[in-house]
Image (tube, helix red, strand yellow):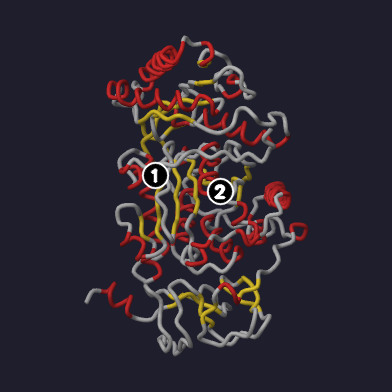
Amino acid sequence: MDTKTQLTEVPLYIKVNGIDNVAIVVNTGGLDQGTVFPCGLELKERVPQGHKVALMDIVENEAIIRYGEVIGYAAKSISKGCWIDESLVILPSSPDLKELPVANDIPKTLPPLEGYTFQGFRNEDGSVGTKNILGITTSVQCVVGVLDFVVNRIKKELLPKYPNVDDVFAINHNYGCGVAINAPEAVIPIRTIQNLAKHPNFGGEALVVGLGCEKLSPIRINPSGDDSDIISLQDQQGFTGMVQSIMEMAEERLIKLNRRQRETFPVSELVIGTQCGGSDAFSGVTANPAVGYATDLLVRAGATVLFSEVTEVRDAIHLLTPRAVNEEVGRALIKEMDWYDNYLALGDADRSANPSPGNKKGGLANVVEKSLGSIAKSGGSPISGVLAPGEKATEKGLIFAATPASDFVCGTLQLASGMHLQVFSTGRGTPYNLAMAPVIKVSTRNTLTEQWKDLIDINAGTIATGEATIEEVGWEIFHLILEVASGKKKTWAEHWGLHNDLALFNPAPIT
């Protein structure tokens, strides 16, 4: 019998903090009533994998504590050894934004991590790409059908002639017309499209396809700032004329991109995004802490690391504002939380909208518990900056990039911030991927890795069973980031050619 089999047969639970009065069950399939743990705790009822068991008697309205924090209050008295499902956990109030400590517990800067490099593409503006892609930006949804037709032809007829070019990608979106273009919050989708067009993986070879009558003028999103890189379909001679014009301008850029070669760059040129989706109760104790350890390694090496998802940070914000490098950064964090509170209030949104049904099936009782696990991706470094949705990153270090928690919207906004690669932790599983930047999938559980061995890139479930440490998996993530960024290794999603559509965040009115 191997070690892994032995470990899974022994009843195991994970208690995160010494003051926790609950723990989560590790064993695949959960554990039955009457199971006795090595410590002597006996289950009074069956507890599913990842779900919470009471480590002591908890009386009605008493705090339920995980991660050393209150995740809720007991809806009724709970006996030691009983399953604490979501119905027994009363959601606590969010931290008061007016009473948060700011920049009063700034982590010490860790020693620099030197000697690590990756292979990338140099751009004329000084930025560095990790892919060599012909990017074509759209100014309005109306042109998407034509552009998709042309992109398929470019891939079949032109791309084989230019082997140094990785791909052709159309920045399609549902914005551009029928919108309140001058509304204050319209700045978010507009700057997102502008910054997507400037993504370092496009090599500065802009091409914009517009219709000709849209509200979002193509010149506003053209990185060159003039009309030399713009094709207006209403100026072309029929459909064949549209196709021919785009094909000709695309080949001009493919010729230039094909001359580019990979060079060696320090890790400090990388912008890495972190995100979690399909989370479960293991996320905050296996995958996310390992991602957080890799985050600290990247920061030590001088890179920029983005963590996001406002609604999955909001209920743990009191643990983040003390880590801000100064008062200004701390106040910027609070400002983004407050903006989103107001945004949700306008839609009469309830905090119970997060977590999802799958999150709850995986053992997460509420958004507080989810948030406490989510912020583990940020590691322990000082927070050096804050970005509003769609803003481009210009600083090094750990950056909070404000985004919704939606995987697709968060990924799109992190791309607009200049992200080269995303590290994505998942407990329930998702085939999510991005075409503009690869996504490394990190599993929270051994079971998911075994089920999806051809979709998961790194298994952090070994942390739960004691086969690996957070540090070991963190280093594994760090090394894989450098290999994927250098084009030496593909993620599973890249291997299969999977990718999700871009999804703009547009809080402005649609007319």
Which percent across, then down, holds residue 348? 71, 54
**Residue placed furthest toward the front:** 238
Q: Which mark is residue 278?
A: none
Around disc 2, counting alpha carbons within 10 Å, would you say few (fewer than 14), some (14 to 19), or many (20 or more)?
Answer: many
- Tag 2 secondary structure: strand
Q: Residue at the spot x=53%, y=40% of the render? A: 503
Q: Hey, what amino acid is under mark 1?
A: Gly
- Mark closer to the chain start, 1 or 2: 1
Q: Which residue is mark 2?
A: 398
Q: Is residue 40 left or right of residue 259?
A: right
Closer to the camera in the image, 391 or 410:
410
**Residue placed furthest toward the left:** 1
Q: Residue at the spot x=58%, y=17% of the render? A: 212
User: Which of pointers 1 and 2 indicates the residue nearer the eye?
Assistant: 2
Q: Is residue 8 left or right of residue 325?
A: left
Q: Hey, what amino acid is under mark 2?
A: Leu
Is residue 57 positioned above or below 452 on the image? below
- Tag 1 secondary structure: loop
Q: Which residue is mark 1?
A: 115
Q: Is residue 362 left or right of residue 372?
A: left
